[in-house]
Image (spheres, rainbow, N blue to C red):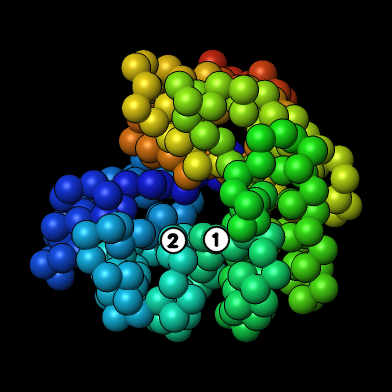
Amino acid sequence: MIIIGERINGMFNDIGEAIKNQDPTAIQKWAVKQIEAGSHYLDANVGPAVEDSPEVMKWLVEVIQDEVDAPVCLDTTNVDAMEAGLEVHKGTAMINSVTAEPSKLEAILPLVKEYDAEVIGLAMDKSGVPKDAATRTAKAMEIVANVDAHGIPMEDLYIDPLILPVNVAQDHAPEVLESIQQVKKLADPAPKTVLGLSNVSQNCTNMGLINRTFMVMAMAVGLDAAIMEANDQEMLDSIATAEIILNNDVYCDSFLQQFRK
């Protein structure tokens, strides 16, 4: 399971204040904590409190990579800010994200190609998040076709079928699971799959339990990655256990400790 730490996001008060004041302290603290917990990537989103400008994204990427040797998932809808982050990024960046809208694909995919980046494709277009698995899968396949046409390796694409909060869109969850399965079956080679996991429990009670349960269910149908709370130890234990049961890791009595290593 590829873990993308979600905590460096301006929607969190401490990160929002840090970005607003150009103070790297909280950002670098969370960068270290998430990498120590096992994150493979660190999502970076300036949030709503400040303008999502090229200068801010550039600063954020540099602050993170000055502290940890890890790739950043550049989480922005501003194409200029995205390119500014790519220009200063060390190693292979991840772009978060592009939809199936032709104008979006034509703006983002050349950057993916130019900077040898990875990219998250959202299974939606200007009509919004589809309700059913068939439409989600169709939008995902449009992204797959465009990625292939741009000469981008399929291994660099992550399809996000977009989970919504279970308290307002309960009927979406089974459709998301079905879409993950279909994406894996219809594309050869298949792209990776990813979820913004915390969305499933937004404003719900028992958020941690909902997240953990949905994570294991999604892993069982082919989920490869998640943007998630990387410091949730119960979540990490659930992932480690699912990896054993799914025969993705070799069992040993210390499998929880081995997973954390």
Q: Which residue is mark 2?
A: 75
Helix, strand or loop at label 2? It is: strand
Horizontal side, residue 209 vs residue 223: left or right:
left
Q: Disc 1 residue type? A: Ser
Q: What is the x, y in percent for residue 247?
A: 72, 25
**Residue of label 1:** 97
Residue 92 picture quarter: bottom right
Name the quadrant containing residue 2.
top right
Name the amino acid type tagged 2.
Answer: Asp
Instruction: Identify which residue, 136 or 96, lies in the foreground.
Output: 136
Determine the residue positioned at 22% across, 60% down.
49
Quarter of the image for the C terminus: give it. top left
Relative to 9, 142 lies left or right: right
User: Residue 255: x and y, percent?
Assistant: 53, 23
Q: Residues within 10 Å of mark 1 (few under 14, many from 20)?
A: many
Q: Are marks 2 and 1 in contact (CB under 8 Å)?
A: yes
In the foreground, 42 or 181: 181
Between 13 and 215, the one nearer to me in the picture? 13
